[in-house]
């Protein structure tokens, strides 16, 4: 019988990792939609709300935890984009990168309000925007565009 892995998000205690050879999970979350492709790939913690935003195979989930209870509270979306790649949060602003949809070359940067999960802006960026970060002063967004899905001038199908 084959074992099946569940897509999970895990919170580890950093002080415990400083001097330990092993890590003890504080909590973990099994995605409700893991059978349809939702997974945990990149996560970002919002210190203002205490939420954990997780980018996975089919979208973004916002997780909230209290003690040992974890719950998905939202699935923010940015219409007309492909699959998500990366996420960063600073001062109430969530920046997420998305691949292009089928037939397009350039991907997207979508900005969300961390508190309301509302889409604030949708900006077309370069091909396969695989990473986003916000500078420490909060004045700039940096996007790394890999263009790895472009083959001989034609983008690969994303969805």
Image: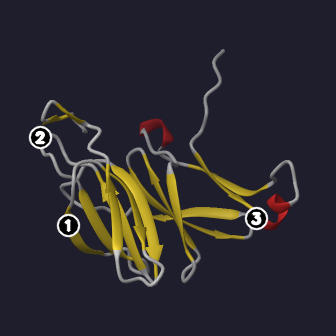
Q: Earlier in the sequence, mark 3 or mark 2?
A: 3
Between residues 122 and 18, which one lies in front from this camera angle? Answer: 18
Mark 1, residues whose alpha carbon is within 10 Å: few (<14), some, or many (≥20)?
few
Total marks drawn? 3
Give percent across and percent down for residue 136: 48, 79
> In percent of the image, x 28 and y 48: which residue is there?
128
Please give left or right for residue 111 compared with residue 53 in the image.
left
Element class at badge 1: strand
Give percent across and percent down for residue 12: 73, 59
Please give left or right for residue 41 compared with residue 99 in the image.
right
Q: Earlier in the sequence, mark 3 or mark 1?
A: 3
Please give left or right for residue 129 compared with residue 4 in the image.
left
Measured Cα–Cα span from mark 2 to mark 1: 17 Å
Residue occupied by mark 1: 123
Residue occupied by mark 3: 14
> In percent of the image, x 61 and y 33: which residue is there?
5
Q: Earlier in the sequence, mark 2 or mark 1?
A: 2
Residue occupied by mark 2: 103
**CB within 8 Å, label 3 to label 2:** no
Element class at badge 3: helix
Element class at badge 2: loop
Measured Cα–Cα span from mark 3 to mark 2: 43 Å
Give percent across and percent down for residue 130: 36, 51
> In percent of the image, x 38 and y 51: which residue is there?
85
> In percent of the image, x 13 and y 34: which residue is there?
154
Q: Quadrant of residue 148?
A: top left
Quadrant position of the C terminus in the picture? top left
Mark 3, residues whose alpha carbon is within 10 Å: few (<14), some, or many (≥20)?
few
Measured Cα–Cα span from mark 3 to mark 1: 35 Å
């Amino acid at each position: 019988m084959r074992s099946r892995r569940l897509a999970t998000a895990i919170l580890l205690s950093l002080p415990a990792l400083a001097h330990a050879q092993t890590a003890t999970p504080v909590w973990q979350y099994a995605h409700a939609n893991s059978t349809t492709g939702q997974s945990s790939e990149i996560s970002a913690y919002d210190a203002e709300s205490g939420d954990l935003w997780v980018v996975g195979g089919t979208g973004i989930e916002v997780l909230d935890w209290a003690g040992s209870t974890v719950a998905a509270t939202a699935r923010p979306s940015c219409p007309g984009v492909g699959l998500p790649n990366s996420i960063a949060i600073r001062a109430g602003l969530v920046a997420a990168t998305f691949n292009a949809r089928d037939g397009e070359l350039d991907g997207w940067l979508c900005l969300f309000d961390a508190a309301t999960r509302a889409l604030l802006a949708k900006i077309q960026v370069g091909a396969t925007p695989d990473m986003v970060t916000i500078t420490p002063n909060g004045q700039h967004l940096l996007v790394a565009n890999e263009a790895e899905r472009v083959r001989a001038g034609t983008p690969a199908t994303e969805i």
